[in-house]
Image: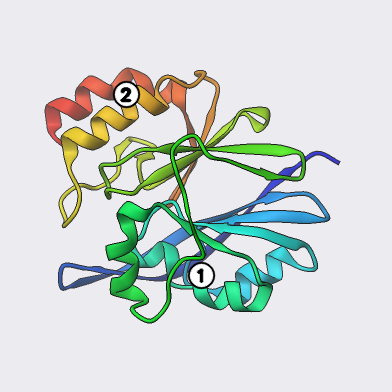
Amino acid sequence: MAARIDQVVTSGTFSLDGGTWEVDNNVWIVGDDEECVVIDAAHDADAIAAAVGGRRLVAIVSTHGHDDHIDAAPDLAVRTGAPVLLHPDDLMLWKQRHPDASPSGELADGQVIEVAGTELTVLHTPGHSPGAVCLYAPSLGTVFSGDTLFQGGPGATGRSFSDFPTIITSIRERLLALPAGTVVRTGHGDSTTIGDEAPHLDEWIARGH
């Protein structure tokens, strides 16, 4: 059976630089009836565990270290025994939320995570945060973009550890190089495609966000 993509939307808060905001997050689950990977264990370990069901959880992959994307990761890891993976450049963000816990392993550019006969390739795409990554699954025609690329533009770069020129470089060189039909499954909100977003790059650069 081919891998499928399930989506769970969870609600909670995002806190950074002394502010807190209400957010809804997309949790993506890639796998088949036997095993799966969770991308961004956000807010609600109960809901995510229910969606995983009786499957073996291969890994909990964090697209970046902002607390709304990792707050449920340690709890889910304890329940399932799955490793939590994070790019090391975002460890300082992780530690703001989980000072007494650490990820189980590191993500690196070009790393391949295999689940249910499907390869997820890690693309290091800094800008929203230093260790932000996307996960490209060519056999599924999709990229999981975390908070790097959304419908309508780049992820936010107005807070600590973020940088607008850097995210533009990541999007231009790593994401817009993917096939136009690639579905972009984002960390928040609606999905889009590379082909729909690519023509607007110059507009984003001009507006500065």
Q: Which residue extends farthest right?
A: 1
The percent coordinates of residue 70 (x first, y second) are 43, 66
Q: Nearer the viewer, residue 173 or 104?
A: 104
Q: CA distance from mark 1 to mark 2?
A: 30 Å
Q: Secondary structure at mark 2?
A: helix
Q: Secondary structure at mark 1?
A: helix
The percent coordinates of residue 25 (x first, y second) are 45, 60
Among the 4 quarters of the image, the one containing residue 19 = bottom left
Image quadrant in which the N terminus is located: top right
Give the residue type at disc 1: Ala
Give the residue type at disc 2: Arg
Q: Residue at x 48, y 22 (%)?
A: 178
Q: Is residue 209 visible?
A: no
Q: Residue at x 38, y 81 (%)?
A: 100
Q: Which residue extends farthest bottom?
A: 100
Identify residue for label 2.
Answer: 172
Identify residue for label 1.
Answer: 73
The percent coordinates of residue 116 (x first, y second) are 76, 45
Reading the chain from its start, which is encountered first: label 1 or label 2?
Answer: 1
Taking the image as shown, residue 135 lies to the left or right of residue 78, namely left
Taking the image as shown, residue 203 lies to the left or right of residue 105, namely left
Q: Is residue 45 above or below residue 33?
A: below
